[in-house]
Amino acid sequence: MPNIEVNDFDLAHTLECGQLFRAERREGWYYVACRDHLFKVRQQNNMLEYDGVDEEFLVRFFALDLDLEAIYRKINVDPHIDAAIRQCRGLRICRQDPWECLVSFICSSANTITNIRKVVKLLSERFGQKAKLDDYETHTFPKPGTLNDVESLREAKAGFRAESIAVANNLVTDEYLHALPSAGYEAARERLMQISGVADKTADCVLLFSMDFLSAFPIDTWVKQVIAKEYFHGQNVSLHKMREFAMIYFGQYAGYAQEYLYHKARMDAGRGKGSRK
């Protein structure tokens, strides 16, 4: 079975930090589904063993081509983020499929990670194709244009988000989403937010987790609490002001700071699989 040597990488932190929703641990392996890919991976010290994809896919998906030490040097600007880096060291922001990422984070609105996982799993079962690796069975994520039955979306536990998923399904294509990065951060963000159900946080999650906009700074309940407490002395500050502050303060890799602060907050609260509100 193929393997690859890795530096500054922690598989568990990366897959369990709430950035993606179709990874399951079984007998020491993580089985990961991403759009129409299914692979398994496990880590022993600085070696990754894997099956189901090639090395090029693995390196890109886990962003192993990035110099994480250089990112730390940019964002490690105070004791709060330093503590998060030490606790979550090796967490990398994955390069997800933009369409699956978009639908997944539409499902994240007022939702928990446990429920998001269930909805994404049901959507894949109802609209995707069967996929199998070893004795692990799952489904591919449905293509744009196939999530067009609102009633079936509701039956997949999407709830009030079903209408927004259907709107996104009818509005965007893979080509449209893959072209967004060339528009630049602000323009891409604005275009995403023209889709029903895509507000600030959802747009920034899609930009950060699937389009390589590493300065994007999604703010959910956990991050809002951390930023308010540690950087605004507990004051009631607007999300817009928090986002502007964080993107300037942490710079071009603000998204990494966000995910480290977010994951640390959940771990400290004993909520490793908690809310993604």
Image (cartoon, rainbow, N blue to C red):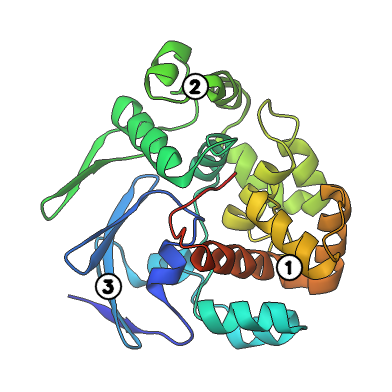
Q: Which mark is nearer the camera, 2 or 3?
A: 2
Tags 2 and 3 in contact by the CB under 8 Å rule? no
Mark 2: secondary structure:
helix
Residue 141 lies in quadrant: top left
The CA span between labels 2 and 3 is: 35 Å
- Closer to the chain start, of discs 1 and 3, is 3
Mark 1: secondary structure:
helix
Tags 1 and 3 in contact by the CB under 8 Å rule? no
Q: Mark 2: few, some, or many residues within 10 Å (few <14, many ≥20)?
A: some
The residue at which mark 3 appears reads as 42
Q: Amino acid at mark 1?
A: Ala
Q: Is residue 3 left or right of residue 143?
A: left
Q: Mark 3: few, some, or many residues within 10 Å (few <14, many ≥20)?
A: some
Q: Amino acid at mark 3?
A: Arg
- Closer to the chain start, of discs 2 and 3, is 3
Q: Is residue 76 visible?
A: no
User: Which residue is depicted at the point 27% across and 72% down?
Assistant: 42
User: Which residue is depicted at the point 64% across and 69% down?
Assistant: 256
| The label number, if any, that marks residue 254 in the structure image | 1
Quadrant holding the C terminus: top right
The CA span between labels 2 and 1 is: 32 Å
Depicted 172 relative to depicted 112: above or below:
above
The CA span between labels 1 and 3 is: 28 Å
The residue at which mark 2 appears reads as 159
- Closer to the chain start, of discs 2 and 1, is 2
Q: Amino acid at mark 2?
A: Gly
Quadrant holding the N terminus: bottom left
